[in-house]
Amino acid sequence: MTDIATSLWPTAVGASTGFRIGGLGDSGTWLLSGPPATDAPEELISHLARLGLPPVGDGIRASRAQVRESGLQGRGGGCFPLASKLDAALLAPGEPLVVVNASESEPASRKDWTLCCHRPHLVLDGAAVVAAIVGSGEVVIHLHRGATRATAAMERAIAERRAAGLSDPRWRVSLGPDRYVAGESSAIASLLQGGEARPLFSAVPMALRGPSGRPTVVNNAETMAHVGLITRTGVPAWRSGGTPSSPGPRLLTLVGSVPDPGMVVELIGQATIGEILSESGHGQRPAGVLVGGYAGTWIDGDIAWRTPFDRVALDCLGAQPGCGLLGVLPHGSCGLSETARLVTYLSAETAGQCGPCVNGLPRLAKAFSELAVGSLRQRGLRRLILLGDAIEGGGACRHPDGVVQLVRSALEVFMDDVARHVAGRSCRGAAHPPVFQVPGVNLRGKGWK
Amino acid sequence: MSIVVRIDPTRCRGHAICALLFAEGIELDRWGYGRVLETSPSDARNTRRAQRAAIACPNHAVVVFDRDGRSDPSSGLGSSEG
């Protein structure tokens, strides 16, 4: 293991070397290293030649220890330690159900799509190891129905592995509706159980008992890929690719006012958001940075510039790494108008189940849109703030809380604009074209299956 | 007996009966939907009231669990899922 580590990962990052940023196929990256961004997903032969065989049999015991010692946190948004999930599943009765969540519901995030389309075997390696650790014979790979290219790449990779006779679990590809909350883990578990792809309420964690009655381990595609990586690099090298509180390398999607919106980069080591953006070709300090997803947190541009992309550092600003989205808002645009479009999108993309989403979010979206166009006054603003308090904490999933967090951070970061809008003065960014793209919300005829 | 009360927000439709029957443990949000107050002690009286609220909810949204996370059989309700 050490030999592989030193030969393949010659530049394990120490404190002195700082950080590296790279894209698909760049040397020096870990998750994204390999063939360049051609149309074809990496073939099994190339993948195994690069990384060697994934662990099997007795090697799985070591893998379990590696996952625990690595401190790997889920990369879907919750930052939940993977080892705790696996321990829960091992503790609970029944054969666990292992799911790779490759649906990537976050509209601007492209990292899981990139992994599925270009490094499918790294994801599958990790999923196979996770299944072996918890003693599960089958793994479900879940994608949105519209993600045809990623689905084709995964199916092709599975066929290659079957033909090669790898000692894998049974693979099953599952497709769900192209809706935002349908990618939430309990919604996927519900769909797999024959229900609708809507989040479920449960008093017990799914890793202990999912809707099928079996322990259900749902992990983001990037999280699985990291497991595949850790078994090759070993724990110390892998951990050195991150920070003590956010160990390991990380994929980020850069959107908004960046040279190539939607570009996925891998961060190895510790870097500030400013360093990440400069290194990726965006040298100008932005007005604000949206961190963690569309239902994420705004950070003031100057503050974000010197904030490390690290769980603890972001937590100090009320933000989370989330799915690794960095949205760059340029000066001269209006953060309130951008936020209004995001809130409107997110409030339309609920499952329509719980009080906070049914009663609260449409009102919140309406009030915030009024603020953006300048028709909200002081009293309305106060009502908007109280509305957020009323919505928070009451849903089956975290969707409404995420929207409230987005709204609160916008009011704080764009405080000056809020004052101008509420006072009825002209908006400084009114003429600026939209920075963040939101998918059209056309839910007509879209079911939950 | 030690209990945990939960409201399944996917089922709650704001009938507000739970808060009438178990005012010590359930408050209403501004739309009349129940929210569990985590501060209420789980003594015998509250347990009885929580179970009454669970039975009275037309949508079976109030669920009373024992500490093992099982739905309390004496409340006459199934599991929280589905």
Image: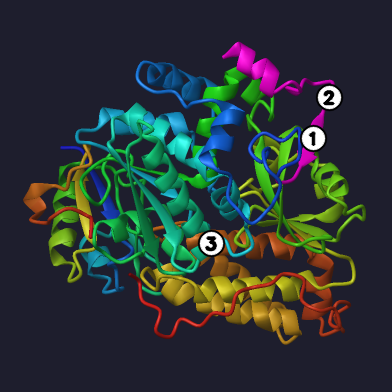
Residue drawn at x 53%, y 48% as measured from the top left: A76
Q: Nearer the viewer, residue A111 or A167?
A: A167
CA gap between label 3 and label 2 equals 37 Å
Is the residue A102 above or below the residue A268 in the image?
A: below
Q: Quadrant of residue A314?
A: top right
Amino acid of disc 2: Thr
Q: Nearer the viewer, residue A42 or A97?
A: A42
Region of the chain picked out in magenta, as a range: A1-24
Q: Quadrant of residue B50?
A: bottom left
Q: Position of residue A417 (x, y in %)?
A: 82, 71
Is the residue A324 above or below the residue A61 in the image?
A: below
* Residue on which disc 3 sits: A149
Label 3 secondary element: helix
Residue A2 is left or right of residue A274, and the answer is: left
The mark tally for this picture is: 3
The answer to which of marks 3 and 1 sits earlier in the sequence is 1
Q: Nearer the viewer, residue A225 or A392?
A: A225
* Residue on which disc 2 sits: A17
Q: Quadrant of residue A26?
A: top right
Which of the numbered marks, if any, corresponds to residue A20? 1
Q: Looking at the picture, do discs 3 and 2 lie on one chain?
A: yes
User: Disc 1 sits on a residue from what chain?
Assistant: A
Label 2 secondary element: loop
CA gap between label 3 and label 1 equals 29 Å
User: Disc 3 sits on a residue from what chain?
Assistant: A
